[in-house]
Image (spheres, coloured by chain):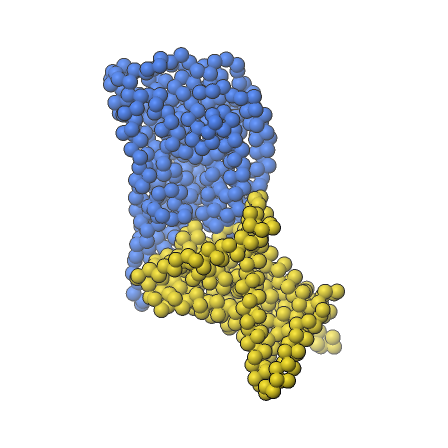
Chain colours: A blue, B yellow
Amino acid sequence: MLQTEQYTINIGPQHPSTHGGLHVEAVMDGEHIVDSIVHLGYVHRSVEKIAESRTYPQFVPYTSRLDYLATHLPTLGYCQTVEKMLGVTVPERAEYIRVIMAEFSRIASHLLFVGSLAIDLGATTGLIYCFRDRERIMDIFEMTSGQRLIASYMRIGGISHDLPDTFIPAARSFIADFPKMIEEYEGLIVGNEILQARLKGIGVLTAEEAIEYGVTGPNLRACGVEYDIRKADPYGIYDRFDFDLPLGSKGDSWDRLLVRIEEMVQSVRIIEQALEALPEGDIKAKVPRIIKPDKGSEVYHRIESSKGELGYYIVADGGEKPYRLHVRAPSFVNLMVLPVISRGEKLQDIIANIATLDPVLGESDR
Amino acid sequence: MENWFVNIAYALTNWLTGLGLSAGWADFILLVVQWVCIIIIVTLNVIVLIWLERKISGFIQQRLGPNRLGPFGMFQTIADAIKLLTKEDIIPSATDKLIFRTAPMFFIIISVMLYVVLPMGENMVIADLNAGVFYFISVGSLTTICLLMAGWGSNNKWSLLGAMRSVAQMISYEIPLAFSLLGVIMIAGSMRLSDIAAAQSNVWFIVLQPVAFITYFIAATAELNRGPFDMPEAEQELTAGAYTEYTGMRWALFFLAEYTNLVAVSALMSTMFLGGWQGPFLPSWLWIIIKTYLVMIVFMWLKWTFPRIRMDHLMSFSWKVLIPVTLANILVTGIALQVFKGMGW
């Protein structure tokens, strides 16, 4: 018998496929992964601490930088948390615009997921196709807020600007072209046999494990658990829309890809309904300039971000700044199952697993 | 036009013997001239090829590709080459210096050696060996050692992983590569590449040996380390595999050698399956260039469309699919040859 030795290999923090500063320490036996340890904190910017020295409205732009791939979702979560604290009712029009922008963010995030999964598996062209279409969403964001990547469009009590005239045609043309885009991804990425062979049965996460670890979002739904905060605990006006929850069955990487692609289709359905029902009216509720929630008020609010359950927990001390703010980041929780699902698989699989768990390091490290 | 290069060679030999040199020395000088020509052509061709690859990938990915330097960005590669030449050559302290330094040199030397037997047109071959195909395959397989040297000498886990992958992959794919060429050799009855090309005057071997063509194409992609089989490099997994520690011109030599290999294998493919220099109207050397470039464009098309296959899938595909298929192809070809011989064809 040849004597073999285990060795550790550091995947990241400087590595092409770790989606930012992720560091995975992998104990390897040849090409097989015996164990892996996730090291976080390379993108730590102490966002939670910064919150304690900023007034409530001042903190809005920071939230945009949490999950910069789905910029409107973390901002929406924060604004709704403060609104819940203050008891503000947001005008109808603002609510609808928020839903439209949130769902566009979800599509943008999932498009990046599909593209970066493709490039992590070596299909460079897939990334470019997804980015081409993501670009149109970025243009839509630019129209409304002047910013493309980190928009900071939501405000406490509503949104910052009303929609420009060019918005509705641009959104409608995106929706009209969307089935064609999906068809292209099916042909180029999803339908590819090499890709299917690399994803099917790889990185299997059982429903029990997912629940034990607190995995949420598309990763949980890929395991077959029907849980979406938009349905389970509707926030904003999500109870008015008709959409399905795509579910996977095996919880492998392949299911995680399919669930996200189907989710984009459902998001487009929501946007269609919201555009149909978009009312006229105010875009911002009357909120005092200086926000001072009552001393001792505590609130937790959660939304369904593109990565999972994104929650904000704010404790107020009567001042104009939060006493403590905590972000329940879905990427952070989801990443913790990486060692579980990668055990015994190959080096190439762990790359695919990181990609299909879809972490955003800006959010998980905060 | 047809015999330009052949005439130049004759004129050179005549001139040299006219100077009073013996025939042996004249041949030797001619050989040196041919070598220099090959090296110049290979280097210039790579510049064109890299530009072409970037343009094709741009076309496939719905973007422009290089378009700033010169017409259609044609001088971009030259600028890149100058940049690579002037870059700092970093040799990490923990490397095995001798192996680290010599690996890229061996790689490029072996790649250029492949051109010795390739017919670049009618009567245009440096050494028309009677075992040309055999020479090509055996020299081509030496590149494995260079990748292993690069990976081992770098003293880096990623490099070593890439090198190990490439050894496993190239050894496995050598077998179907050789087997798929056997069918052609059986029909042509010769291993001399010029004979094989001449034997296709009526019908190209791609028609008689379609299965062999497909298996050869797949095995050649793996042999060339090009996508979807670019395991040794595997940018997204192994950062740059065996080339991780290389910088500047050393890295560029690997690049150069890979493209040189690509041209050689494509030229062999057009000689073995696509009729070699045969073709109407145009001179033979132009036909082989056209065919080689077409084959290379298909290689690039594949690379920019497919994701990378997984290592164990790659191995099982070679041993469980390609090798049985090529063996069956040899059997069927042999039976068919005997049957046709019996029918007096």
- Residue A53 screen position, x and y as percent: 27, 25
Count of marks overlaid on the render:
0
Q: Residue at x 59, y 86 (%)?
A: B21
Along the viewing direction, whichever of A45 and A125 lies nearer the viewer: A45
Instruction: Tell whether B66 sits left or right of A334.
Output: right
Q: Quadrant of the C terminus of chain A?
A: top left
Along the viewing direction, whichever of B140 and B40 lies nearer the viewer: B40
Q: Residue at x 74, y 77 (%)?
A: B344
- Residue A198 screen position, x and y as percent: 46, 50
Instruction: Tell whether A149 sits left or right of A181.
Output: left
Along the viewing direction, whichever of A341 and A121 lies nearer the viewer: A121
Looking at this view, name the residue that lies furthest to the front.
B19
- Residue B264 screen position, x and y as percent: 56, 66
Picture quadrant of residue A56? top left
Q: Residue at x 75, y 65 (%)?
A: B281
Instruction: Tell whether A307 sits left or right of A125.
Output: left
Q: Quadrant of the N terminus of chain A?
A: bottom left
Residue A183, placed above or below residue A198 = above
Q: Is residue B23 visible?
A: no
- Residue A261 screen position, x and y as percent: 50, 37
Residue A283, placed above or below residue A179 = above
Q: Residue at x 50, y 13 (%)?
A: A281
Picture quadrant of residue A177? top right
Q: Is residue B304 visible?
A: yes
